[in-house]
C-alpha cells in the first residue's frame, strides 16, 4: 500500500470519528508518519504521543521515552471533555433545547472506574447544570459510597439526555437519539471499567432493549466490551421502600465485578457530600 493510499484511509477514519463521536478527535490533528514511509521522524516526539486516543501515527525510532511529559495526556483529556461540554451547551438538535435553563453534560472523575448513566436532568439539575443534585442525587451518592464509589474521585455521572424534559417526563426516542453521540463520546473519552445504568430509560437506550429494570437487573451486559449492570433509579427507591433491598443486592453484585476488574479501586474513593 502506498503512502497516498494510507493517507486516504487516515482521512476517512478522521471524518468517521468526527461524525460518530460528535466532536473533533485531537489525535487526528497531527500529520501521520507511517512505519514504512521514507519520511523524517517528527521533531517533537511528544506531539506524536497520545495515550488516550490511539492514532495511526508511528512512534519515533528512538526507544528512549525519558523526555516525555505524560502530564500532557491528562490535559488533552480535559480539553476534549471541555470541548464536548461546549458542544452540548450549544446543542439545538431537539426541542428540549427550547425549554432548558442549563445543559447538564455530566460531572465526576476524568479517570473513572465507573460511569453512572441516568435518564435526564430534573428541576434542580436544570437549575444548577449538574447531574443528580436533588433528593435522588443525594441518595445516589449514598448508594455509591456504600460500595466505595464517589463522583469526586472514581466515578463519572451522566445522563441519556443532557437537557431536562418538561415536567420530568421520560425523554422521547428522538430526543434520546439526538443526544446519543454525546454519551458515546463521553464513554470513548473516559474509558470506564464498568457502567451502572440507573433506571429503565438509561438501560433501554444504552443497551438498545425493550426490557425494563426488573428483567435486566441481576446480570451483566456488554457495551463495547465494557460490563454494564442495571439497577433501580434512586427516584424509584424514594417512592418505594420495597425496592431498596433488591437495589442493595444489585450494588453488592456490582462491587464484586469491580473488584474483579480493578482490585484496588476502593483505595481511590473519597467521600462526596451532596448539597
Image: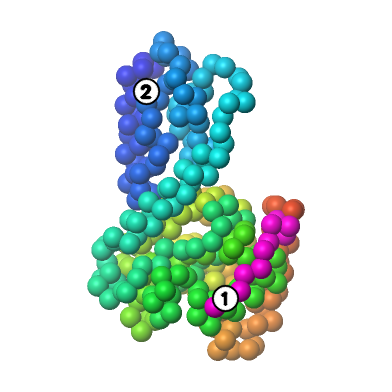
* Residue occupying image coordinates x 28% and y 60%: 90
Q: What is the spatial separation of the Cα atoms under label 2 and label 1, in whole angstroms?
A: 51 Å
Considering every residue shown, the one lying at the far top of the view is: 38
Mark with earlier residue (2, 1): 2
Q: In x, y percent, where is residue 247?
A: 65, 77
Asked whether residue 173 is in view, the answer is no
Task: Tell me where residue 24 sits by quadrant.
Answer: top left
Q: In x, y percent, where is residue 130?
A: 45, 70
Asked whether residue 76 is in view, the answer is yes
User: In which quadrant will I find the N terminus?
Assistant: top left
User: In which quadrant will I find the C terminus?
Assistant: bottom right
Task: Tell me where residue 124 sits by quadrant.
Answer: bottom left
Q: Which mark is residue 115?
A: none
33 part of magenta stretch: no
Q: Is residue 136 or residue 76 the one in the foreground?
A: 76
Please give left or right for residue 43 compared with residue 24 in the image.
right
In the image, is residue 194 above or below residue 163?
A: above
Report the coloring of the rendering.
rainbow
Q: Nearer the viewer, mark 2 or mark 1?
A: 1
Prevailing SS of the magenta stretch = loop
In the image, is residue 92 above or below residue 11?
A: below
* Residue occupying image coordinates x 49% and y 53%: 187
Please give left or right for residue 13 compared with residue 233 in the image.
left
Badge 1 marks a residue whose secondary structure is loop
The crowding category of the residue bearing disc 2, from other C-alpha atoms within 10 Å (few below 14, some 14 to 19, many at least 20), is some
Q: Which residue is mark 1?
A: 274
Magenta residues, as a range? Answer: 265-275
Q: In x, y percent, where is residue 202?
A: 48, 68
Q: Which residue is mark 2?
A: 6
Task: Tell me where residue 238 sits by quadrant.
Answer: bottom right
Amino acid at each position: 500500500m502506498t503512502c497516498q493510499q494510507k493517507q486516504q484511509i487516515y482521512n476517512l477514519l478522521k471524518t468517521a470519528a468526527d461524525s460518530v463521536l460528535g466532536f473533533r478527535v485531537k489525535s487526528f490533528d497531527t500529520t501521520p508518519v507511517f512505519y514504512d514511509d521514507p519520511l523524517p521522524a517528527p521533531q517533537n516526539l511528544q506531539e506524536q504521543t497520545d495515550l488516550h486516543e490511539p492514532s495511526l501515527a508511528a512512534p519515533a525510532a528512538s526507544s528512549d521515552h525519558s523526555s516525555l511529559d505524560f502530564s500532557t495526556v491528562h490535559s488533552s483529556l480535559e480539553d476534549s471533555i471541555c470541548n464536548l461540554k461546549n458542544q452540548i451547551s450549544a446543542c439545538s438538535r431537539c426541542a428540549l433545547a427550547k425549554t432548558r435553563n442549563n445543559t447538564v453534560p455530566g460531572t465526576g472523575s476524568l479517570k473513572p472506574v465507573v460511569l453512572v448513566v441516568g435518564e435526564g436532568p430534573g428541576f434542580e439539575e436544570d437549575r444548577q447544570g449538574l447531574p443528580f443534585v436533588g433528593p435522588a442525587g443525594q441518595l445516589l451518592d449514598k448508594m455509591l459510597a456504600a460500595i466505595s464509589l464517589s463522583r469526586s474521585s472514581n466515578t463519572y455521572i451522566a445522563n441519556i439526555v443532557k437537557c431536562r424534559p418538561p415536567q420530568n417526563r421520560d425523554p422521547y426516542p428522538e430526543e434520546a437519539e439526538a443526544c446519543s453521540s454525546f454519551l458515546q463520546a463521553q464513554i470513548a473519552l473516559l474509558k470506564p471499567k464498568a457502567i451502572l445504568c440507573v433506571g429503565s430509560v438509561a438501560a433501554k437506550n444504552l443497551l438498545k432493549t425493550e426490557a425494563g429494570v426488573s428483567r435486566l437487573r441481576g446480570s451483566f451486559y456488554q457495551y463495547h466490551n465494557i460490563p454494564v449492570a442495571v439497577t433501580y433509579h434512586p427516584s424509584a427507591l424514594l417512592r418505594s421502600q420495597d425496592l431498596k433491598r433488591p437495589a442493595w443486592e444489585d450494588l453488592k453484585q456490582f462491587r464484586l465485578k469491580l473488584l474483579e476488574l480493578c482490585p484496588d479501586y476502593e483505595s481511590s474513593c473519597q467521600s462526596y457530600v451532596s448539597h
